[in-house]
Structure formats: C-alpha cells, structure tokens
Image: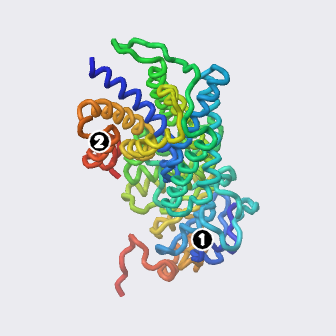
C-alpha cells in the first residue's frame, strides 16, 4: 500500500515538473538558450491563479487567464530580452536569463508582498479514493491533466503540419525558411505554449500548497534543468518521462534514503547516476 | 529564367563570388562546375537567399529578387536541395516531404507526394523511417523529393553526386533528365565534371569565385582541349600518355 501511495505522490510531483520542464526544453531545442527565467513565469502563474480564483470563484477561468497572460508575457520576454542577443555566445543569454529570474522574484516581492498569498476558499479539495488512496481532486487533476496535456502536445508535434514545421525549425532553421516556414512565428508560438504550461503548473502548485510566494520558482527552476538533461535536451516525450521518473524516484528516495540525503540531493544523485550510464539522456540517441 | 547580373556574395568581409553573370534559360539544365571552394555553393545559396549579396542582382523572370527574404523565395518558384542534403533527420521521410510542400495548401500534398514517390520508388519503401536512417543515395533522393514537393519552377541541386555510390548517382541523374522533360529548370552544382557535362545544356566554370568559361555543354563535350584547359583532367577519364 505504501508503494502505491509513494508511486502516486511521485506521479503528482512528476506531472508538475513535466509542465514546467516542457517549456524549458522547447526553448532549449529551438534557441539553445537555458531559459532560467521560465520558473519566474511559473510563479506568476501561481499569483494570477490565486487572484483570479479569489475574485471570480472560478478555477477554470483562473487557469485560462494565467495561461494566456503568462503566455503573452513569455513572448514579450523573448522579443525584448532574448532576440537582441541571439547571435551572442550562449552564456550571454544564460546570464541575462538568471538576472531576469532574480528581478522577477524581487518584483513579485514588491508587488504581492513577501509573505505570499493563499486561496480564500481553495477549490478541488474534496477527497477522492483511488486504489484505496485518498487524494484531493486537485492532486488528481494535476496528475491527469499534466500527462494528458503534454501527451497531446507531443502528438500534435508528430501529426500536424504546424508541429512538423516546428520540428523542422528545431533541426535546421535555415532549411525550414527555404520551404516557407516563418521561423520567427515558430519561436513566438514556442514561447507562448511553454510559458502557458508553466503558468498552469504554477496555478496548480499554488492550489496544492495553498500558498504562492515570490521564491516558489527556485526549486522547480534547477530541478527542471536536471529533467531536460535527463530527457534529452529538446525532446518533449523524453522530458515527460524524465519528469515522471524523477518524481517517483524522489518520492521513494525520501522514504528510503531520507536519512542520508534530502529530496533535492536525491534528485541530483539520480541525475548524476543516469548521466554516467547514459550521457545522451534517458531516451536520447547517441550523437 | 534565372539571371545573375554581376553578382558578388560572401560571408562578412570575405567575398566568395566576384561579379558573376549568367543566364539559365527556361526548361534547361545549367551546371556550375569547378574545384572545391570555387564559389559554386555560395552562388546557389545566394540565389536561395542564405548568403549575403555584396553587389549585383539576382533576377527571376526579370523580377529583381536580390532582397526577397528566403521564406518568400519558395513562393516565387525556387526550391533547393542543398549541399550535405540537410534533411530534417529526426522526421520521417513522409514528414520531410510534408515540410517540402509547406508553403502550398495542404490539399496539394497527396498529389505531389505521389509524384515524388513515382520518381523515387525507393523513398516509398522507407516512407515511415527517420530521414537520418537512410543511405546516402536515398538521402539525396529525399533532398530532391523534398524540394519537388514545393512545385518549383527552378530546382537547385548542390553537389548532386558527392559521396554517393555510382548507382545512386545514375538514379539521381535519371531523375534530373525526367524533371527537365517536365519543364522544370534545373541549376546544379557538380564537382564531377564528366557527369555535369553529360547532363547539362549549359555550363559555367568557376575558379576562385570568378567565371572562367561558360558555354554549351555540347561544345565542351566535343572539345577535350577545352575541358582540359578549364577543368583539368576530370574524374573518370583515363590519363593520356604523351
């Protein structure tokens, strides 16, 4: 019974990781930028979620507003911060991104206050029994929703013309242009989708913890970096699997290795072990 | 159909091609030949819009397309099978073809795909495999097929035979003959001069970024001295003993 419970808890945490990490891997795949500030957008999603839910009473509306607002902000970040430095060495964008992330945390502190916000009446708190486990509806929604959304995204990338254009742009932007693909539009779409997913993750994490605070993005930001490396940089399906695997490993690890290492140390020990065995990531082909 | 008017192009301060002028007549096969680094690929990539033009003009059907963005050139009728093939290696053969026809309405895909597979039946056998898993010859066929999906009037093929088995080279040149018969104008780059002279109607010889000879391929085929003077001893020919 304990195993099932740990496994489910791992999947819930893994789904959150996946929603955050997918945006990061999309950006890396396309622009070779490690978009640290992505986690700042995740936090903003949490704030918008709490504010809109409290104002209107609708979590669905909150998810929609958070996704659209943060998606558009993600596009703006690309336009203002990244586009002008794309032909500089990659560390320039990395430094810009770290600076941006710190600035975002401080802005949230000033605007929303240092103590964080909570839902006045958090929705989806009723208990659901699954294989004898008691889960909240919110946890169930995260687990199901996260996996479904990302699986649909991977399927769209596989089967539609737009998805194919996106993949072609990732492989060879110049050739994609030669066949009439507007690669700038692909980048904007990329930032919109990735940022919107992070915002939804932020709303749901704020709901599960019933708290959103300025530094909520710190742990997901470096955890997501580990995940996209494990998943094979730029690979959506690999990221989903790596995120779920990491969630489950952490859940078991905190029980069985908790005396030796804390949760984050377990995550990175897992990363190190996997990369020693498979330097190309869990699913990646050898370069 | 395609005309270069004193085209100079290159990378940054480096000039790869100097004041190159030639005209590719509608429905013909035009070959750019010359040694490695002579500026053949730079010329083709400038026509595709990927190499910076430093002077002169590129005209398509009399229209100046020198400053047309690369994404718009496929709509003007130009498609490219580039050097090194540059396929979308993670995508299947089928998806590569879909990208080729991206600028056209989706309804055109099925018909164009059928035409490409009729030209290169081998691609049909491997339709669901990733492009990266194909052999060199199959990759070249896919690069040409992908370009054909765009319904080009001008097809540019860079290094048709480079790194291919002789049989695959034959298949590619057979396809080029058929495409010419369909009325597609073809500009090709080739290091194998013998092959280029056989396939082409007109030839331009480049050396260090300058045109040193251009004329009818038939004339060059008839006059070995000309070939020797401008092209050196071409591959595939026996050395002549004095």
Quadrant for residue A8, please give it. top left
Q: Which mark is residue B184?
A: none
Q: What's the CA distance linking mark 1 and mark 2?
A: 67 Å
In this figure, which residue is indicated by the disc labeled 1?
B216
- Mark 2 lies on a secondary structure that is helix
Classify the position of the C terminus of chain B by image quarter.
bottom left
Residues packed near mark 1 inside 10 Å, few (<14), some (14 to 19) or many (20 plus)? some
Identify which residue is drawn at 45% across, 79% down: B232
Dot 2 corresponds to which residue? A270
Report if residue A170 is visible in the image.
Answer: no
Q: Which residue lies at the image location 38% right of the left edge and 55% below the top edge?
A: B167
Residue at 52% x, 17% y: name it: A124
Q: Please, which chain is the residue tagged with disc 2 on? A: A
The x and y percentages for residue A252 are 28, 30
| Secondary structure category for the residue under label 1 | strand
Instruction: Give the left or right position of residue B20, taking residue A137 as reference.
Output: right
């Amino acid at each position: 019974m304990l195993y099932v419970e740990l496994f489910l808890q791992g999947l819930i945490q893994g789904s959150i990781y996946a929603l955050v990490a997918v945006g990061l891997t999309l950006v890396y795949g396309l622009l070779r930028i490690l978009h640290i500030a992505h986690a700042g957008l995740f936090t903003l999603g949490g704030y918008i979620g709490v504010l809109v839910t409290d104002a209107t009473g609708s979590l669905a509306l909150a998810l929609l507003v958070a996704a659209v607002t943060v998606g558009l902000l993600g596009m703006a970040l690309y336009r203002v911060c990244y586009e002008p430095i794309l032909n500089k060495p990659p560390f320039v964008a990395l430094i810009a991104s770290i600076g941006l992330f710190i600035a975002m945390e401080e802005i949230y502190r000033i605007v929303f206050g240092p103590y964080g916000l909570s839902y006045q009446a958090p929705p989806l708190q009723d208990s659901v029994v699954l294989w004898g486990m008691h889960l909240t509806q919110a946890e169930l929604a995260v687990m199901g929703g996260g996996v479904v959304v990302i699986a649909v995204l991977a399927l769209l990338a596989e089967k539609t013309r737009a998805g194919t254009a996106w993949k072609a742009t990732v492989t060879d932007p110049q050739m994609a242009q030669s066949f009439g693909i507007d690669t700038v539009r692909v980048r904007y779409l990329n930032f919109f989708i990735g940022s919107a997913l992070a915002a939804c993750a932020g709303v749901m994490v704020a709901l599960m913890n019933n708290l959103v605070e300025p530094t909520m993005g710190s742990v997901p930001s470096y955890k997501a970096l580990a995940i996209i490396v494990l998943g094979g940089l730029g690979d959506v399906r690999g990221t989903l699997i790596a995120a779920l695997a990491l969630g489950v490993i952490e859940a078991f690890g905190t029980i069985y290795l908790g005396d030796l290492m804390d949760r984050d140390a377990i995550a990175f020990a897992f990363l190190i072990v996997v990369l020693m065995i498979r330097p190309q990531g869990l699913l990646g082909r050898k370069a | 159909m395609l005309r270069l008017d004193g085209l100079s192009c290159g990378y940054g301060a480096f000039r790869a091609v100097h004041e190159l002028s030639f005209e590719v007549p509608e429905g013909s096969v035009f070959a750019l030949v010359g040694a490695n680094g002579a500026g053949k690929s730079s010329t083709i990539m400038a026509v595709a819009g990927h190499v910076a033009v430093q002077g002169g003009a590129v005209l398509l059907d009399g229209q100046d397309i020198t400053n047309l963005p690369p994404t718009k050139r496929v709509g003007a009728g130009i498609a490219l099978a580039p050097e090194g093939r540059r396929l979308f290696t993670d995508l299947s053969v089928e998806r590569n073809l879909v990208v080729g026809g991206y600028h056209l309405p989706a309804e055109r895909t099925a018909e164009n795909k059928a035409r490409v597979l009729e030209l290169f039946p081998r691609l049909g056998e491997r339709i669901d495999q990733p492009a990266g898993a194909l052999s060199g010859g199959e990759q070249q066929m896919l690069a040409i097929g992908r370009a054909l999906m765009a319904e080009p009037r001008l097809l540019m093929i860079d290094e048709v035979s480079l790194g291919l088995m002789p049989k695959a080279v034959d298949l590619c040149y057979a396809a080029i003959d058929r495409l010419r018969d369909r009325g597609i104008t073809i500009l090709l780059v080739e290091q194998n001069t013998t092959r280029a002279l056989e396939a082409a109607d007109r030839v331009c010889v480049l050396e260090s970024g300058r045109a040193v000879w251009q004329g009818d391929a038939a004339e060059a085929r008839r006059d070995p001295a000309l070939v020797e003077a401008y092209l050196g001893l071409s591959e595939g020919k026996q050395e002549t003993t004095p």
